[in-house]
Image (cartoon, helix red, strand yellow):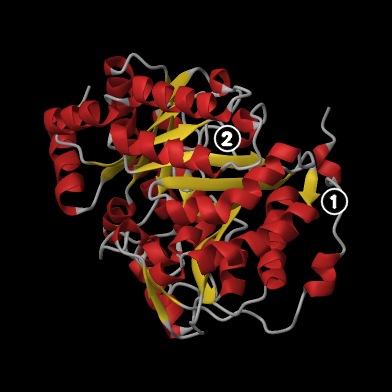
Amino acid sequence: MMNQRDILSTIEMIDQQHLDIRTVTMGVSLLSCSDQNPDLACRKIYDKICRYAGSLVKTCEEIEAEFGIPIVNKRISVTPIALVAAASDTEDYVPFAETLDRAAKACGVDFIGGFSALVQKGMTLADRRLIHAIPEALSVTDLVCSSVNVGSTKAGINMDAVAMMGRIIKETAERTADRDAIGCAKLVVFCNAVEDNPFMAGAFHGVGEAEKVINVGVSGPGVVHHALQAVKGASFDVVAETIKKTAFRITRMGQLVAAEASQRLDTPFGIVDLSLAPTPAVGDSVARILEELGLETCGTHGTTTALALLNDAVKKGGVMASSSVGGLSGAFIPVSEDEGMISAAQKGTLTIDKLEAMTCVCSVGLDMIAVPGDTPAETISAILADEAAIGMVNSKTTAVRLLPAPGKKAGDRIELGGLLGSAPIMPVHQEGSAAFIARGGRIPAPLQSLKN
């Protein structure tokens, strides 16, 4: 039971510290929509999404009004389309993306995720068709997000898929060059992708999930930052406890919204994803939390340690608050979406190499990083491989969202708008990796995968 002090504190967090429900995401299984006739399959997909998620936005708005809790995004995730489209007699998977886009617009949501393929051990014909369709699909749709899982701790890393995705990212950037490569902001390459992630662009509805489900993503970097200002100079024990208690309060709010949405939509409650997902707004930055711990600028020596402490304390606080914490849950470090990260990158303190080190201890990986437009596809593939290796060996989810901005070089800037923000173009190493990527094949799973 919340007392008056708790209620007033929550109001302050929402009103002054950027606390919000970042997303309510409805997952929808499309396995029943498979059909040999691709037109009929698309019709089934559209009808099922609209039938299940047609009242999602309205319900979320009612919860916002009743409880005074901002819900920033309403989203839909679906079964990886490569699985659904495999039965269809067609080589062109772009119409499936267009169908998702139409359904998302009809439901009024912000994004729909699931134009995806899981190829960590090998690629089916359907997987190849979907991957080759990604550049056009993301250039002709507005709300569709795509993801490809190229590795896992159990399977190793599919280096053929890694090489292919380097080329796909380049082509996607070129097809959306007039919009600062925004197509790449809707494309994630994973290792150890999870089935219940409510956050875009990597959300999809896993095959182990129910027919439909409600997952909620909570975010509150500003709240954590504010809490740490009250313990300036205190030991790390105190810092960890402060973050843990704050994460507990944030998660309880997410649990409340998730339960309400689940009941009103007659949809099973899945998980609360407690991820400190920043925005470009001042006061809503993960980088500023790290600097509050005593770093002059995010990216300097000590940054990885600070992030490890933050991520661990957030997870512990969330697990205490809900028995259904899942998804990614921790701290995100998307450069373009975090004003502190943007500032550190502009100063040159935060580099891609340092970001890679930070991904060893954070929730995801190299996220929303703009690189020069002339970066070779093989270099992009090598960056994907490095990040997948971190995920594979450490049994954690890692991901990459790179934006090679056509016609732009290191020091220039891209503007994406909204929650996607803006970012300086960060330099990459000029020494090539082409011969490495050309080897192909599969990197075997590590020894720690043998747990049976």
Q: Is residue 190 at least partly visible in the picture?
A: no
Q: Does 424 appear above or below 272? A: below
* Quadrant of the rendering where the N terminus is positioned: top left
What residue sits right under mark 1 in the picture?
442
Q: How many marks?
A: 2
Could you tell me the amino acid type at mark 1?
A: Arg
Residue at horizontal 68%, vertical 84%?
430
* Quadrant of the rendering where the C terminus is positioned: top right
* Residue 337, image x, y percentages: 38, 62
Residue at horizontal 43%, vertical 73%?
295
Could you tell me the amino acid type at mark 2?
A: Ile
The secondary structure type at the circle numbered 1 is strand
Which of discs 1 and 2 lies nearer the camera? The answer is 2
Residue at horizontal 30%, vertical 25%?
54
Horizontal side, residue 124 vs residue 194: left or right: right
Name which of mark 1 and mark 2 comes first in the sequence.
2
What residue sits right under mark 2 in the picture?
81
The secondary structure type at the circle numbered 2 is helix
Horizontal side, residue 128 vs residue 20: left or right: right
Picture quadrant of residue 294: bottom left
